[in-house]
Amino acid sequence: MGFIGANGAGKTTTIKSILNMIHLDRGEIHILGKNMAEHELELKQDIGVAVGGMNFYTRSKIKTLTNTIKKFYKNWDEATYRNCLRKFKLDENKRIIELSEGMKIKYSLSLALSHGAKLLILDEPTSGLDPVARDNLLDIFQDLVVDGEISILFSTHITSDLEKCADFITFIENGQIIQSMEKEDFKESYRLLNGNESQLHQVKEKLISYKTNSFGFTGLIHFSNYDPSANIKATVPTLEEILIFFAKKEDMYV
Protein backbone atom coordinates (compact mmCIF):
# COMPACT_ATOMS: atom_id res chain seq x y z
CA MET A 1 0.00 0.00 0.00
CA GLY A 2 1.30 3.42 -0.97
CA PHE A 3 0.97 6.11 1.70
CA ILE A 4 0.93 9.61 0.22
CA GLY A 5 0.45 13.18 1.32
CA ALA A 6 2.25 16.50 1.22
CA ASN A 7 5.13 17.23 3.57
CA GLY A 8 3.63 17.79 7.01
CA ALA A 9 0.45 15.87 6.19
CA GLY A 10 1.12 13.35 8.96
CA LYS A 11 2.78 10.39 7.23
CA THR A 12 5.77 10.06 9.56
CA THR A 13 3.61 10.76 12.62
CA THR A 14 1.29 7.96 11.52
CA ILE A 15 4.21 5.56 11.13
CA LYS A 16 5.54 6.51 14.57
CA SER A 17 2.05 5.89 15.96
CA ILE A 18 1.89 2.47 14.30
CA LEU A 19 5.21 1.57 15.91
CA ASN A 20 4.08 2.93 19.30
CA MET A 21 6.92 5.47 19.28
CA ILE A 22 4.69 8.39 20.29
CA HIS A 23 1.76 8.80 22.66
CA LEU A 24 -1.71 8.63 21.11
CA ASP A 25 -4.14 11.34 22.20
CA ARG A 26 -7.01 9.01 21.38
CA GLY A 27 -7.83 5.91 19.38
CA GLU A 28 -6.04 2.59 19.02
CA ILE A 29 -3.59 0.98 16.59
CA HIS A 30 -4.42 -2.56 15.51
CA ILE A 31 -1.95 -4.66 13.50
CA LEU A 32 -2.60 -8.22 12.38
CA GLY A 33 -5.80 -8.11 14.41
CA LYS A 34 -4.11 -7.15 17.70
CA ASN A 35 -3.89 -3.95 19.72
CA MET A 36 -0.36 -2.55 19.44
CA ALA A 37 -0.41 -1.01 22.92
CA GLU A 38 -1.30 -4.37 24.47
CA HIS A 39 0.86 -6.64 22.28
CA GLU A 40 3.79 -4.40 21.30
CA LEU A 41 6.64 -6.86 21.89
CA GLU A 42 4.77 -9.68 20.18
CA LEU A 43 3.74 -7.60 17.17
CA LYS A 44 7.19 -6.11 16.64
CA GLN A 45 8.43 -9.63 16.01
CA ASP A 46 6.29 -9.49 12.85
CA ILE A 47 7.18 -5.95 11.73
CA GLY A 48 10.20 -4.85 9.71
CA VAL A 49 11.14 -1.22 9.15
CA ALA A 50 13.31 0.32 6.44
CA VAL A 51 13.90 4.06 6.52
CA GLY A 52 15.77 6.11 3.97
CA GLY A 53 18.98 7.69 5.27
CA MET A 54 19.95 5.08 7.88
CA ASN A 55 22.39 7.02 10.08
CA PHE A 56 22.68 5.11 13.35
CA TYR A 57 25.74 3.16 14.51
CA THR A 58 27.48 4.26 11.33
CA ARG A 59 30.91 3.14 12.55
CA SER A 60 29.73 -0.40 13.27
CA LYS A 61 30.33 -3.22 10.85
CA ILE A 62 27.30 -4.99 9.41
CA LYS A 63 28.14 -8.25 11.18
CA THR A 64 28.58 -6.49 14.54
CA LEU A 65 25.24 -4.70 14.25
CA THR A 66 23.47 -7.86 13.10
CA ASN A 67 24.84 -9.91 16.00
CA THR A 68 23.26 -7.39 18.37
CA ILE A 69 19.94 -7.00 16.55
CA LYS A 70 19.21 -10.70 16.00
CA LYS A 71 19.16 -11.33 19.76
CA PHE A 72 15.85 -9.47 19.95
CA TYR A 73 14.04 -11.80 17.52
CA LYS A 74 12.92 -15.25 18.59
CA ASN A 75 12.31 -16.37 14.98
CA TRP A 76 15.66 -15.25 13.60
CA ASP A 77 16.68 -17.44 10.65
CA GLU A 78 20.41 -17.31 10.01
CA ALA A 79 20.12 -19.16 6.69
CA THR A 80 17.65 -16.57 5.39
CA TYR A 81 19.96 -13.80 6.51
CA ARG A 82 22.92 -15.35 4.70
CA ASN A 83 20.82 -15.75 1.56
CA CYS A 84 19.87 -12.06 1.74
CA LEU A 85 23.51 -11.02 2.06
CA ARG A 86 24.30 -12.98 -1.10
CA LYS A 87 21.24 -11.82 -3.00
CA PHE A 88 21.81 -8.15 -2.16
CA LYS A 89 25.61 -8.41 -2.49
CA LEU A 90 26.20 -7.10 1.04
CA ASP A 91 29.66 -7.42 2.56
CA GLU A 92 29.16 -7.94 6.30
CA ASN A 93 32.65 -6.63 7.02
CA LYS A 94 31.73 -3.18 5.72
CA ARG A 95 30.78 -0.43 8.12
CA ILE A 96 27.36 1.23 7.82
CA ILE A 97 29.04 4.51 6.86
CA GLU A 98 30.57 2.77 3.83
CA LEU A 99 27.22 1.66 2.41
CA SER A 100 25.37 3.53 -0.30
CA GLU A 101 21.80 4.61 0.48
CA GLY A 102 20.49 1.72 -1.61
CA MET A 103 22.66 -0.78 0.25
CA LYS A 104 21.44 0.59 3.59
CA ILE A 105 17.86 -0.15 2.57
CA LYS A 106 18.85 -3.63 1.38
CA TYR A 107 20.50 -4.26 4.75
CA SER A 108 17.32 -3.16 6.55
CA LEU A 109 15.32 -5.51 4.32
CA SER A 110 17.75 -8.34 5.08
CA LEU A 111 17.15 -7.87 8.80
CA ALA A 112 13.37 -7.73 8.36
CA LEU A 113 13.17 -10.82 6.16
CA SER A 114 15.45 -12.80 8.48
CA HIS A 115 13.11 -12.54 11.44
CA GLY A 116 10.03 -13.41 9.42
CA ALA A 117 8.38 -9.99 9.23
CA LYS A 118 4.82 -10.08 7.89
CA LEU A 119 4.56 -6.30 7.59
CA LEU A 120 7.27 -4.08 6.13
CA ILE A 121 7.02 -0.37 6.85
CA LEU A 122 9.06 1.67 4.38
CA ASP A 123 9.50 5.39 5.06
CA GLU A 124 11.02 7.21 2.08
CA PRO A 125 13.14 4.16 1.21
CA THR A 126 14.17 5.43 -2.23
CA SER A 127 14.93 9.01 -1.22
CA GLY A 128 18.30 10.13 -2.54
CA LEU A 129 18.80 7.14 -4.83
CA ASP A 130 19.74 7.40 -8.49
CA PRO A 131 17.13 6.11 -11.00
CA VAL A 132 18.87 2.75 -11.53
CA ALA A 133 19.17 2.03 -7.79
CA ARG A 134 15.55 3.10 -7.25
CA ASP A 135 14.28 0.84 -10.00
CA ASN A 136 16.27 -2.08 -8.58
CA LEU A 137 14.74 -1.59 -5.13
CA LEU A 138 11.22 -1.30 -6.53
CA ASP A 139 11.69 -4.65 -8.28
CA ILE A 140 12.74 -6.14 -4.93
CA PHE A 141 9.65 -4.72 -3.20
CA GLN A 142 7.40 -6.18 -5.89
CA ASP A 143 9.03 -9.60 -5.60
CA LEU A 144 8.49 -9.61 -1.82
CA VAL A 145 4.70 -9.34 -2.05
CA VAL A 146 4.11 -11.78 -4.90
CA ASP A 147 3.14 -14.74 -2.71
CA GLY A 148 0.96 -12.64 -0.40
CA GLU A 149 2.83 -13.54 2.78
CA ILE A 150 4.31 -10.06 3.24
CA SER A 151 2.48 -6.73 3.16
CA ILE A 152 4.23 -3.40 2.59
CA LEU A 153 3.27 0.08 3.78
CA PHE A 154 5.27 2.38 1.49
CA SER A 155 5.40 6.04 2.51
CA THR A 156 7.01 8.30 -0.06
CA HIS A 157 6.80 11.65 -1.82
CA ILE A 158 8.20 10.06 -5.01
CA THR A 159 4.85 9.19 -6.54
CA SER A 160 6.37 7.60 -9.64
CA ASP A 161 7.59 4.79 -7.37
CA LEU A 162 4.01 4.08 -6.34
CA GLU A 163 2.80 4.28 -9.95
CA LYS A 164 5.08 1.33 -10.59
CA CYS A 165 4.61 -0.90 -7.58
CA ALA A 166 1.63 0.04 -5.38
CA ASP A 167 -1.72 -1.72 -5.57
CA PHE A 168 -3.55 0.36 -2.95
CA ILE A 169 -3.22 4.05 -2.06
CA THR A 170 -3.96 5.78 1.23
CA PHE A 171 -4.05 9.57 0.92
CA ILE A 172 -3.58 11.66 4.07
CA GLU A 173 -4.09 15.41 4.47
CA ASN A 174 -3.69 17.38 7.71
CA GLY A 175 -3.59 14.18 9.72
CA GLN A 176 -6.85 12.86 8.23
CA ILE A 177 -7.24 10.00 5.78
CA ILE A 178 -8.94 11.44 2.71
CA GLN A 179 -9.15 8.20 0.72
CA SER A 180 -7.92 4.62 0.91
CA MET A 181 -8.60 2.37 -2.08
CA GLU A 182 -7.09 0.53 -5.03
CA LYS A 183 -4.65 2.74 -6.90
CA GLU A 184 -6.50 2.81 -10.21
CA ASP A 185 -9.83 3.49 -8.49
CA PHE A 186 -8.17 6.30 -6.56
CA LYS A 187 -6.91 7.99 -9.72
CA GLU A 188 -10.21 7.37 -11.52
CA SER A 189 -12.02 9.26 -8.74
CA TYR A 190 -10.53 12.50 -10.10
CA ARG A 191 -10.30 14.27 -13.43
CA LEU A 192 -7.74 16.77 -14.65
CA LEU A 193 -9.45 19.46 -16.71
CA ASN A 194 -7.82 21.64 -19.36
CA GLY A 195 -9.78 24.50 -20.86
CA ASN A 196 -9.95 28.18 -21.76
CA GLU A 197 -10.81 31.12 -19.50
CA SER A 198 -14.55 31.06 -20.24
CA GLN A 199 -14.70 27.34 -19.43
CA LEU A 200 -12.94 28.00 -16.13
CA HIS A 201 -15.88 30.11 -14.98
CA GLN A 202 -18.22 27.16 -15.65
CA VAL A 203 -16.39 24.82 -13.27
CA LYS A 204 -14.39 27.09 -10.95
CA GLU A 205 -16.59 26.53 -7.90
CA LYS A 206 -16.28 22.75 -8.22
CA LEU A 207 -12.53 22.55 -8.69
CA ILE A 208 -10.29 21.34 -5.89
CA SER A 209 -7.72 23.81 -7.22
CA TYR A 210 -6.47 25.13 -10.53
CA LYS A 211 -3.68 27.07 -12.18
CA THR A 212 -3.85 29.43 -15.13
CA ASN A 213 -1.51 30.40 -17.94
CA SER A 214 -1.71 32.23 -21.25
CA PHE A 215 -3.49 29.25 -22.84
CA GLY A 216 -6.22 28.81 -20.23
CA PHE A 217 -6.39 26.70 -17.09
CA THR A 218 -5.64 23.27 -15.68
CA GLY A 219 -7.59 22.10 -12.64
CA LEU A 220 -8.41 19.05 -10.57
CA ILE A 221 -11.97 17.98 -9.87
CA HIS A 222 -13.66 15.08 -8.14
CA PHE A 223 -15.14 12.77 -10.74
CA SER A 224 -18.52 13.03 -9.00
CA ASN A 225 -18.50 16.78 -9.78
CA TYR A 226 -17.37 16.37 -13.38
CA ASP A 227 -19.93 17.11 -16.08
CA PRO A 228 -18.89 15.68 -19.48
CA SER A 229 -21.47 17.88 -21.20
CA ALA A 230 -19.33 20.94 -20.39
CA ASN A 231 -17.11 19.77 -23.26
CA ILE A 232 -13.90 20.48 -21.35
CA LYS A 233 -10.92 18.24 -22.04
CA ALA A 234 -10.59 15.77 -19.15
CA THR A 235 -7.97 13.14 -18.37
CA VAL A 236 -7.25 10.77 -15.49
CA PRO A 237 -4.54 12.44 -13.39
CA THR A 238 -1.35 10.87 -12.14
CA LEU A 239 -0.70 10.49 -8.42
CA GLU A 240 1.73 13.39 -8.64
CA GLU A 241 -0.85 15.66 -10.24
CA ILE A 242 -3.38 14.82 -7.53
CA LEU A 243 -0.88 15.70 -4.80
CA ILE A 244 0.14 18.94 -6.52
CA PHE A 245 -3.39 20.22 -6.93
CA PHE A 246 -4.41 19.32 -3.39
CA ALA A 247 -1.38 21.30 -2.21
CA LYS A 248 -2.64 24.29 -4.24
CA LYS A 249 -6.10 24.34 -2.64
CA GLU A 250 -5.43 27.44 -0.57
CA ASP A 251 -4.69 29.40 -3.77
CA MET A 252 -7.96 28.50 -5.47
CA TYR A 253 -9.60 31.90 -5.16
CA VAL A 254 -6.48 34.04 -5.13
Image (cartoon, rainbow, N blue to C red):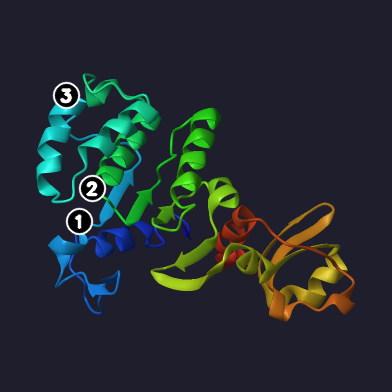
Tell me which amino acid carries mark 2.
Answer: His
Camera-nearest residue between 221 and 39:
39
Q: Which mark is residue 45?
A: 1
- Please name the residue that numbered disc 3 is placed on: 59
The answer to whether the residue labelled 1 contacts the one labelled 3, judged by CB atoms less than 8 Å apart, is: no
Residue 242 coordinates in the image, percent (x, y): 61, 60
Camera-nearest residue between 69 and 97:
69
SS of the residue under disc 2: loop
The residue positioned 45% from the left and 66% from the top of the image is 172
* Screen quadrant of the C terminus: bottom right
Residue 159 coordinates in the image, percent (x, y): 55, 50
Q: Is residue 4 visible?
A: no
Camera-nearest residue between 71 and 200:
71
**179 displayed left or right of 232:** left
Q: Is residue 161 visible?
A: yes
The residue positioned 40% from the left and 42% from the top of the image is 125
Tell me which amino acid carries mark 1.
Answer: Gln
Q: Which mark is residue 115?
A: 2
The answer to whether the residue labelled 1 contacts the one labelled 2, judged by CB atoms less than 8 Å apart, is: yes
**Of labels 2 and 3, the one closer to you:** 2
SS of the residue under disc 3: loop
Residue 71 coordinates in the image, percent (x, y): 9, 43
